[in-house]
Image (cartoon, rainbow, N blue to C red):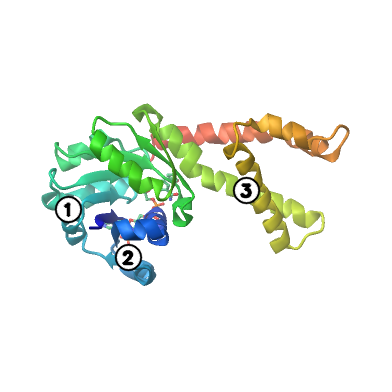
Amino acid sequence: MKTKVAILGGGNLGTALAEGLARTDDASSKYDVTITRRNTKHISYLEDSGITVTSDNAAAVDAAHLVIFSVQPTQIEALINEVKSDLDPQKHILISTMAGVTGEEITELTGSGFPVIRVMPNTAAAINQAMTCIEQTPHKEAEQEVVELFETLGKTLVINSELMEASTVLGACGIAFFLRYIRAASQGGIEVGFHAEEAQLIAAQTALGASALLLNSDSHPEHEIDKVTTPKGCTIAGLNEMEHNGLSSALIKGIKISYEKIEKIR
Ligand SMILES: NC(=O)C1=CN([C@@H]2O[C@H](COP(=O)(O)OP(=O)(O)OC[C@H]3O[C@@H](n4cnc5c(N)ncnc54)[C@H](OP(=O)(O)O)[C@@H]3O)[C@@H](O)[C@H]2O)C=CC1
Ligand SMILES: O=C(O)[C@@H]1CCC=N1
């Protein structure tokens, strides 16, 4: 029998999760997904992938075993108040994607007794290439079910609670950070002669190749960089110019500011 999943909050992340679950042959045979939002017309296209789309949060919760909260942090209180009477600690595992919202805060809203697992996926879930960090909790059986679900959407890592905010910045916001790099590289590519589509293809595939060099071996970025920087060549000239202009420093500072912002989101 399929595991019933309710995604409450069919926005950018919620739809990415739903699309990823619908895309995987294995997952589609294992999970039955319902997604909700108030303005369902924006996500009715998901029905073509076998996903149930509704604005009825209570009905979605009632039918589900895994309940994923994926509304904005400021919207969670109203949402939980709406579905509270339909939540059952014997039946539901509660999963939260919300940045800066702790498991304790969710428990305060739902009442105690529920396994609450915080997760931090990213929008690459839509193509089953997400990185999802999962908060370690005492709820080991529930955690295993959550890990299994997110393994269908990409890679997972179970981490201590105090690292959830750090994982938000590095993994979830990270998609935007890396994409901005690719965009800037494409613009540079146009300056040196490529049409926009060609520049983007070269930049994006090169970023994928650089990632794969690390993920497919135990290599370190600097080791791989050393292999590209031919003495007196053009790579080291470009790299040093980028560093003179603060490339690494800008990235590190951006990550730190992003991290500091999480506390102020609500
Ligand atoms: N975007 C990302 O890459 C990531 C986001 N997150 C976290 O995930 C959460 C969602 O973020 P994101 O998808 O970007 O935000 P969005 O604003 O895109 O999505 C939130 C969705 O929730 C819906 N919603 C609001 N209230 C309700 C309600 N009462 N019942 C049902 N649906 C409701 C809204 O639609 P409507 O108004 O139609 O109801 C909206 O589509 C946030 O907490 C964020 O911190 C975590 C990791 C990555
Ligand atoms: O920008 C945000 O606040 C959310 C959390 C991580 C990605 N998007």
Q: From the top left corner, tell me how far across and down residue 78 is, in percent.
A: 22, 51
Mark before the other along the chain sequence, 2 or 3: 2
Q: Amino acid at mark 2?
A: Ile
Q: Position of residue 259 (x, y in %)?
A: 46, 33
Q: Is residue 8 above or below residue 115?
A: below
- Element on which disc 3 rests: helix
Q: Residue at x 12, y 47 (%)?
A: 88
Q: Which residue is mark 3?
A: 208
Residue drawn at point x = 84 percent, y = 35 percent: 230
Nearer to us of marks 1 and 3 is 3
Along the line of sight, which residue is nearer the eye, 102 or 52? 52
Q: Kindly identify which numbered label has been placed on residue 51.
A: 2
Q: CA distance from mark 2 to mark 1?
A: 21 Å
Distance (Cα) linking label 1 and label 3 = 41 Å
Residue underneath mark 1: 83
Secondary structure of the residue carrying tag 1 is helix
